[in-house]
Image (spheres, helix red, strand yellow):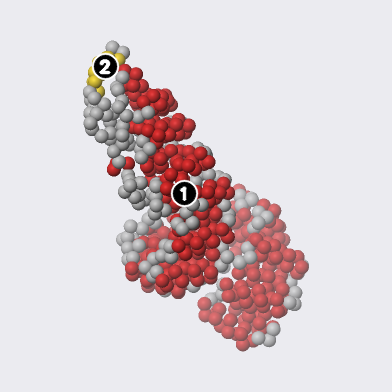
């Protein structure tokens, strides 16, 4: 990292003899000092030049004008041999890599001269040298010798906070706030205190600073931000609402309030954003947040409508175009999905490989396999590369080219154990789909010889053992997986469901599924398992509650088979037939669904 470039030194031309050498230095006392280039950022150390940006974004002409607009009253500094020697020592030491010596020489020179230009340079070099104490001393001299300089005040404040001397920084922070009558300086408090690990202390300090500004919306918003960091959600909510009351058109408090409400309920957050958008329909960020919440609530059609409206107003916003594409794909509306993803390829979108991946998926869903292969093949790298190669192989398998598909997977190089495992699981799934479960079983069995404790392999091996009626291996591998990963919800669920399906050890099955529900309470397949074990235990009413909830969350054909069976047995046959009909339209070849229907409607 190069030493920070030195500023022009504004002194009269002099000629002086040092160490037998004649050195000529040219400068002009009447010429204003050129601003020093900022010192490179040091790890976890605030930089004075950056601290300039932490002040008010719109300073008033009288109290917070930029430093360049205020002509500082510079001291009448004589260029003595001692001053020149220390200056040259500091610069030459820095250029030769002795930054510690340079910082110390500059610090001494700043103390001696009390010149704000030298003090600023001393602070910059001390930050570069990772000497926070010296940087603070120099910044203090800079501010004391040039009290009208906002950059000096901001630098000193930032350095004190960076050194975890928050209490000492308070009076300087108060000066910064006083210098900004519009209140914009409050918006920088969160960033200034970002490195303070004691969030409760940060909240206390921010409350102290804002106490004198009860009518300033930004002050309340600053408290809200600090309260979020300290885990004080109720206080944060109250302060966002206070900020909104003082400044109803301001979107930031509304967005933060919606985030806080979302912790309670997406519906509450949607109501708050909806009310704001109704009055302020042009606020893009609020509308984006509203649309994202609709997605979280699985209201995909409404979310797409919102994003489509946004895309009309902001046609070149790649994030909006991407959202419309994804939601159209989710709704199986492939034409607009394809159009939006293709548009992203010509927009400056950051991740075109993911776009190609989605285009491949669209083609695959429409059984346009040559086009799908072309898109997957064009995924050149990135996080989705491995997934694209697996999808490429699966498309080959769907075309009946299983040998070619397996060969493709074997030539893909995975750069991690996790990647190798995913390739193995994909190959096993292709064998399953080709009705070759024994070959899949052998494949995973051989893989476990080199990776005996790999969780995903153990789980898949257990599921394949069930297909081959190897109940002993099913139970032993799932129990081993639970020992290795006590929080593996699907291991508990699979073991409990297998017992319920065989109608044996039902109390044990219920306990296992209850444990799975504790770990993953919203998983529709685990909810379905609970309904199924309750049905096996003769508790039809309770079973229906779980099965209906599972089917509402995910209308999967196997969940439909279970729900339909329990409804049929409970005498609600018309509803059972309706659910089975819906499911068979979506998954006409599902074995579990078809076998269930045949048992009751031969």
Which quadrant holds residue 100?
Answer: top left
Q: Quadrant of residue 359?
A: bottom left
Among the two numbered marks 1 and 2 on one chain, the one whose residue lies closer to the N terminus: 2
Looking at the image, which residue is at 37% across and 33% down? 145
- Dot 1: element: helix
Which residue of the protein is positioned furthest toward the top in this rendering?
20
Question: Which residue is tagged 2?
Answer: 16
Q: Is residue 510 shown left or right of residue 209?
A: right
Q: How many marks?
A: 2
Mark pair 1, 2: CA separation: 49 Å
Q: Quadrant where the N terminus lies?
A: top left
Residue 140 lies, with reference to residue 351, above or below; the image says above
| Dot 1 alpha-carbon crowd within 10 angstroms: few under 14, some 14 to 19, many 20 or more | many
| Residue nearest the observer in this picture, 548 or 503 | 548
Q: Is residue 486 visible?
A: yes
User: Which residue occupies 40% across, 26% down?
Assistant: 111
From the viewer's perspective, is 168 left or right of 520?
left
Depth check: 129 or 61 in front? Answer: 61
Q: Is residue 382 above or below residue 101?
A: below
Q: Nearer the viewer, residue 2 or 140?
A: 140
Q: Secondary structure at mark 2?
A: strand
**Where residue 602 sits in the image (x, y, percent)?**
63, 85
Q: Report x, y in % for residue 251.
A: 43, 62
Q: Tell me which residue sits at (68%, 70%) in the image.
A: 530
Residue 99 placement (x, y as % from top left): 41, 27
Residue with the mark numbered 1: 189
């Amino acid at each position: 990292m190069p030493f920070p470039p030195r500023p022009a030194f504004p002194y009269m031309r002099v000629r002086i003899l040092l160490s037998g050498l004649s050195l000529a230095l040219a400068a002009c006392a009447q010429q204003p000092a050129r601003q020093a280039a900022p010192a490179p950022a040091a790890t976890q150390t605030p930089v004075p030049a950056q601290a300039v940006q932490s002040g008010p974004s719109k300073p008033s002409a009288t109290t917070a004008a930029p430093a360049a607009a205020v002509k500082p009253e510079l001291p009448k500094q004589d260029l003595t041999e001692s001053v020149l020697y220390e200056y040259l020592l500091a610069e030459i030491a820095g250029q030769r890599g002795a930054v510690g010596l340079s910082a110390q020489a500059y610090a001494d020179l700043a103390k001696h001269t009390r010149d704000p230009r030298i003090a600023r340079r001393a602070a910059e070099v001390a930050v570069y040298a990772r000497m926070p104490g010296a940087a603070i001393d120099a910044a203090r001299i800079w501010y004391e010798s040039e009290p009208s300089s906002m950059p000096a005040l901001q630098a000193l404040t930032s350095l004190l906070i960076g050194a975890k001397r928050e209490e000492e920084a308070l009076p300087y922070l108060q000066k910064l706030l006083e210098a900004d009558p519009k209140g914009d300086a409050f918006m920088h408090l969160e960033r200034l205190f970002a490195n303070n690990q004691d969030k409760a202390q940060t909240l206390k300090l921010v409350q102290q600073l804002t106490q004198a500004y009860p009518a300033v919306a930004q002050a309340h918003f600053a408290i809200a931000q600090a309260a979020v960091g300290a885990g004080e959600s109720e206080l944060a909510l109250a302060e966002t609402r206070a900020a909104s009351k003082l400044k109803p058109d301001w979107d930031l408090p509304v967005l933060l309030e919606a985030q806080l409400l979302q912790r309670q309920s997406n519906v509450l957050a949607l109501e708050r954003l909806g009310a704001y958008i109704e009055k302020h329909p042009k606020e893009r960020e609020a509308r984006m947040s509203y649309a994202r919440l609709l997605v979280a609530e699985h209201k995909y059609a409404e979310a797409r409508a919102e994003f489509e409206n946004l895309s009309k107003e902001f046609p070149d916003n790649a994030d909006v175009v991407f959202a419309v594409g994804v939601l159209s794909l989710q709704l199986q509306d492939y034409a607009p999905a394809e159009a939006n993803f293709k548009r992203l390829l010509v927009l400056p979108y950051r991740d075109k490989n993911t776009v190609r991946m989605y285009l491949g998926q669209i083609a695959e869903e429409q059984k346009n396999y040559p086009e799908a292969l072309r898109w997957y093949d064009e995924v050149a790298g990135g996080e989705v590369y491995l997934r694209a190669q697996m999808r490429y192989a699966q498309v080959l398998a769907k075309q009946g080219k299983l040998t070619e598909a397996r060969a493709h997977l074997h030539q893909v190089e995975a750069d991690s154990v996790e990647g190798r495992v995913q390739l193995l699981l994909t190959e096993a799934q292709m064998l399953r789909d080709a009705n070759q479960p024994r070959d899949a079983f052998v494949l995973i069995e051989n893989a476990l010889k080199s990776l005996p404790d790999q969780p995903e392999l153990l789980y898949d091996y257990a599921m394949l053992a069930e297909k081959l009626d190897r109940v002993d291996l099913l139970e032993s591998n799932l129990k081993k997986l639970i020992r290795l990963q006590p929080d593996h919800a699907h291991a508990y669920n699979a073991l409990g469901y297998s017992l319920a399906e065989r109608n044996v050890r039902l109390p044990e099955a219920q306990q296992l599924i209850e444990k799975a529900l504790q770990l993953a309470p919203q998983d529709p397949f685990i909810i379905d398992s609970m309904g199924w074990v309750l049905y096996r235990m003769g508790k039809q009413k309770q079973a229906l509650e779980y099965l209906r909830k599972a089917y509402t969350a995910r209308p999967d054909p196997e969940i439909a088979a279970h729900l339909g069976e329990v409804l049929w047995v409970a005498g609600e046959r018309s509803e059972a037939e309706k659910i089975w009909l819906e499911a068979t339209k979506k998954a006409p070849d599902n074995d579990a669904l078809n076998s269930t229907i045949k048992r009751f409607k031969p």
